Amino acid sequence: MSNFSLDPQLVADCEWVADLPLCTVLLLKDANYPWLVLVPKIANCKEIIDLSTSQQEQFWRESAAVSRVLQVLFKPDKLNVAALGNVLSQLHIHHIARYKDDISWPKPVWGQHPAKTYETNLLTERVAQISQLLNL
């Protein structure tokens, strides 16, 4: 993990929330949706299959924990979990709380609407809530 660094685009688009044993947890700065991103802290990792078996198991534990936080905190109609990587090759997995009345439903969130900026207080509150529920 010593050579790991976040892609500059993730740094620009997200707010750091926490570091779990394997992954960094980020909040995407788009107030249209509760949207977390997990990034395994493994250098040059592009695909989940690039992780060792034990790392994959740890990733799924952390993904489940993040998904539970989204369910508890936001009570979504559906959770979307996706690892696309077509624009940014560093492995990063989106966890998005979706609602039947959100602005993109039922379509995928990508390319539907411009990102909505968080108010500073709400961004700070979200990060604190998520971090607390992750028991950090």
Image: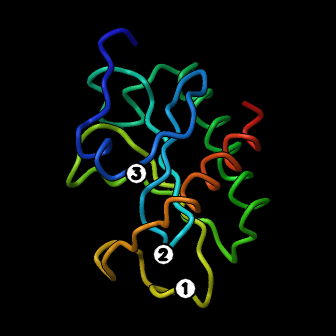
Q: Which residue is mark 1?
A: 102
How crowded pointer 3 is (Cα within 10 Å; few <14, some 14-19, many 20+) is rated as: some
Type of amino acid under label 2: Asn
Between circles 3 and 2, the one closer to the viewer is: 2
Percent from the top left, x then y, of residue 111? Answer: 28, 76
Q: Nearer the viewer, residue 79 or 54?
A: 79
Query: Which residue is at 51% across, 30% downward?
Result: 23
For the N terminus, which image quadrant? Answer: top left
Which circle marks residue 32 in the picture? 2
Which circle marks residue 119 in the picture? none
Query: Which residue is at 53% across, 39% downward?
Result: 25
Rounded to the nearest angstrom, the CA distance separating label 3 from label 2 is: 20 Å
Q: Are marks 2 and 1 in contact (CB under 8 Å)?
A: yes
Percent from the top left, x then y, of residue 92? Answer: 39, 43
Q: Which residue is mark 3?
A: 83
Q: Circle 3 sits in a helix, a strand or a loop, which is it?
A: loop
Rounded to the nearest angstrom, the CA distance separating label 1 from label 3 is: 21 Å
Percent from the top left, x then y, of residue 123? Answer: 54, 57
Q: Earlier in the sequence, mark 3 or mark 2?
A: 2
